[in-house]
Image (spheres, grey):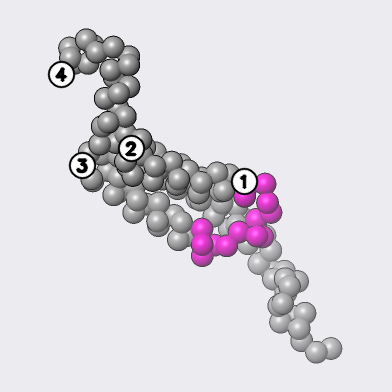
């Protein structure tokens, strides 16, 4: 098999990739490409304050990426592009969760100053 690959020209190898089960004519290619949007959105959110992070949604994204990583590894042929995409998303989401947790620990005693808290809505 290795000698057959070496004998192919660059154009032949590219055509073989395009027509392969993982090539750009399939959802095995375009699904992971679309999922990079999650990673880019998570990276963009690192510029926002940690008080805007939803720990519930971030946790769901972590579980989602773990499940998709397992799926990408177990299917045949293995979808390495999907695996790497969700590994990157898992990393970004865990970073976001750690930012939120650090903020939460610092502000936990002062939760009464949060908008809509009991201290603000209680009658004087």
The residue furthest right is 124
Q: Earlier in the sequence, mark 1 or mark 3?
A: 1
Give the foreground label among 1 and 2: 2
* Image spot of residue 18 (x, y percent): 31, 29
Give the label on residue 76, or none: 3
Contact check, label 3 and label 2, Cβ < 8 Å = no
Q: Earlier in the sequence, mark 4 or mark 2?
A: 4
* Structural distance between the alpha carbons of marks 4 and 2: 24 Å
Total labels: the figure holds: 4
- Residue 98 magenta: no
* Image spot of residue 42 (x, y percent): 56, 48
Is disc 4 surrounded by few (<14), some (14 to 19) or many (20+) residues within 10 Å? few
Is disc 1 surrounded by few (<14), some (14 to 19) or many (20+) residues within 10 Å? few
Give the label on residue 44, or none: 1
Contact check, label 1 and label 2, Cβ < 8 Å = no
Instruction: Specify start and end residues of the magenta stretch as a single range.
Output: 45-58
At 40% from the left edge and 51% from the top edge, which residue is drawn?
Answer: 65
* Structural distance between the alpha carbons of marks 3 and 2: 17 Å
Q: Secondary structure at mark 3?
A: loop
Q: Which residue is mark 4?
A: 1
- Residue 91 can be seen, yes or no: no
* Image spot of residue 78 (x, y percent): 25, 39
**Which quarter of the image is occupied by the C terminus?**
bottom right
Give the foreground label among 3 and 2: 2
At 51% from the left edge and 46% from the top edge, which residue is drawn?
Answer: 37
| Most foreground residue, 122 or 38 | 38
Q: Earlier in the sequence, mark 1 or mark 2?
A: 2
Contact check, label 4 and label 1, Cβ < 8 Å = no
Q: Which residue is mark 2?
A: 25
- Residue 100 can be seen, yes or no: yes
Q: Earlier in the sequence, mark 3 or mark 2?
A: 2
Q: Secondary structure at mark 1?
A: helix
């Amino acid at each position: 098999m290795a000698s057959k690959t070496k004998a192919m020209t660059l154009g032949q190898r590219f055509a073989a990739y395009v027509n392969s089960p993982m090539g750009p004519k399939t959802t095995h290619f375009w699904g992971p490409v679309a999922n990079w949007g999650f990673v880019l959105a998570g990276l963009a959110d690192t510029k926002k304050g940690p008080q805007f992070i939803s720990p519930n949604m971030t946790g769901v994204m972590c579980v989602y990426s773990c499940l998709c990583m397992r799926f990408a590894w177990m299917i045949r042929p293995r979808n390495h592009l999907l695996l790497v995409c969700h590994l990157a998303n898992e990393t970004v989401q865990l970073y976001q969760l750690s930012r939120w947790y650090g903020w939460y620990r610092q502000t936990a005693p002062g939760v009464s100053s949060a908008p809509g808290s009991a201290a603000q809505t209680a009658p004087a």
